[in-house]
Amino acid sequence: MTYSRKRYWLALGAALAVTAALTLISQPHPAVMMMVVVAVCGALGFLAYFSLDEIQRQNEMRAWYYGGLLASLFGLMLLPLLMSNAMLEAMAGLLPNASRMAPDMLHSPRIYFCIGLAVTLVVQAIGHFIAHAVFKVAGRAH
Amino acid sequence: MKNRIKVLRAEKNWSQAELAEKLYVARQSVNAIETGKADPSLPLGMRIAKVFGVKVEDVFSDD
């Protein structure tokens, strides 16, 4: 796919708009609709990514990688620091414990999975922008 | 990796934007390659040489 600045911004804008619109409009989210949103936004994200030229893709990949490192280093700290004690205790209760392994504890509720996924992705996205800013200051990227 | 893109571009009297248009890349990418901040892939390197009408080794060389 050839480079197209217009297609990149259109695809990226559409992905963000679809996410924002469906998140705000539809409450609560049916599971099927969430899967559709993820699929549509994923496809638009790929379209945006492949609308960049190879040098821009190199920079995006590098920034995403370092953003991931930042997320690993600092992002996961947000969870224990900002989360309420009650929720932390509830999460701790989900850890495998052979002495009180009840059937209903074998499957963690979806909310914890969603929180974990959301925090990781959001922090990685923020880390990605921080990495871009650092590259810009260091003069390694454009 | 060193390159002579700036010299070749000056010979042709092309701006970075004009070269970027011929290569189907962003102007910023041409600038990044020209200043050595980014290295192009082999296909892009060959495309650059083709646009200037020279061999790849006439555009790029080792440090």
Image (cartoon, coloured by chain):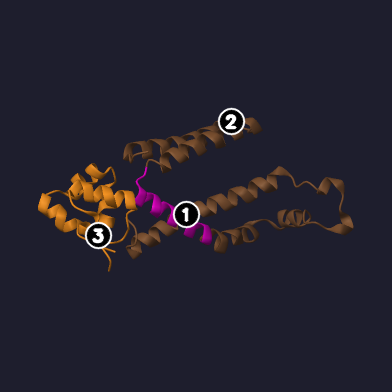
Chain colours: A brown, B orange
Q: Residue furthest bottom?
A: B63
> In the image, which disc is placed on residue B60?
3
Q: Chain of mark 2?
A: A
Q: Chain of mark 1?
A: A
Q: Which segment is the magenta one?
A: A52-69
Whichever of labels 1 and 2 marks the residue nearer the N terminus, that label is: 2
Residue on which the image places disc 2: A26
Quadrant (top left/top right/bottom left/bottom right) for the N terminus of chain B: bottom left
Q: Secondary structure at mark 2?
A: loop
Crowding near the residue tagged with mark 3, few <14, some 14–19, many ≥20 C-alpha atoms within 10 Å: some
Look at discs 2 and 3 and give the one toward the viewer: 3
Q: Amino acid at mark 3?
A: Phe
Residue on which the image places disc 1: A64
Crowding near the residue tagged with mark 1, few <14, some 14–19, many ≥20 C-alpha atoms within 10 Å: many
In this orientation, which residue lies closer to the viewer: B49 or A36? B49
Q: Residue at x 77, y 53 (%)?
A: A94
Marks 2/3: CA distance?
55 Å
Up/down of A132 relative to B24, above or below: below
Is any part of residue A30 visible from this angle? no
Q: Secondary structure at mark 1?
A: helix
Q: Residue at x 54, y 32 (%)?
A: A22
Most common SS among magenta residues: helix
**Do callouts 1 and 2 point to residues on the same chain?**
yes
Q: Secondary structure at mark 3?
A: strand
Q: Amino acid at mark 2?
A: Ser
Q: Residue at x 39, y 58 (%)?
A: A133
**Do callouts 2 and 3 point to residues on the same chain?**
no
Marks 1/2: CA distance?
30 Å
